[in-house]
Image: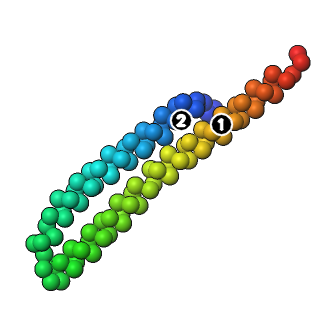
């Protein structure tokens, strides 16, 4: 098994980067949705219903897409806290040795 090395500040930076990218993607999706929304008036009848349903699916997909990186960032942060706690515990155990 390969050794695992990390630092909590690196993990925090990675979590923040994931959130930043998710926000950029969300901004792009919002911009595209605004541009597509301007087409709403061009549709009529069953085509308008299909367009509206497509926009609802688009919004749902965007929401799910945005939830994934946020979940990843939360997991990284939780792992960072657990890693730091284990590191602190190990240090305390070493310091308690009377050698």
Q: Which mark is residue 83?
A: 1
Q: Is residue 63 above or below residue 89?
A: below
Q: Position of residue 7 (x, y in %)?
A: 58, 29
Do the numbered discs 2 and 1 sit on residues whose CB atoms are within 8 Å?
A: yes
The residue located at (44%, 50%) in the rendering is: 69
For the N terminus, which image quadrant?
top right
Left or right for 8, reference 62: right
Circle 2 sits in a helix, a strand or a loop, which is it?
Answer: helix
The residue located at (40%, 55%) in the rendering is: 66
Q: Quadrant of residue 31?
A: bottom left
Residue 75 visible in rendering: yes
Residue 1 visible in rendering: no
Residue lying at the far left of the rendered structure: 42
Left or right for 35, reference 65: left
Q: Position of residue 83 (x, y in %)?
A: 65, 36
Q: Is residue 71 above or below residue 3?
A: below
**Mark sitting earlier along the chain (2/1):** 2
Q: Which mark is residue 67?
A: none
């Amino acid at each position: 098994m390969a050794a695992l090395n990390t630092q909590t500040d690196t993990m925090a930076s990675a979590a923040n980067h994931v959130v930043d990218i998710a926000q950029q993607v969300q901004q792009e999706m919002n911009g595209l949705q605004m541009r597509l929304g301007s087409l709403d008036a061009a549709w009529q009848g069953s085509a308008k219903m299909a367009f509206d349903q497509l926009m609802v699916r688009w919004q749902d997909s965007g929401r799910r897409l945005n939830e994934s990186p946020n979940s990843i960032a939360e997991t990284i942060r939780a792992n960072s806290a657990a890693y730091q706690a284990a590191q602190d515990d190990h240090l305390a155990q070493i310091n308690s040795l009377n050698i």
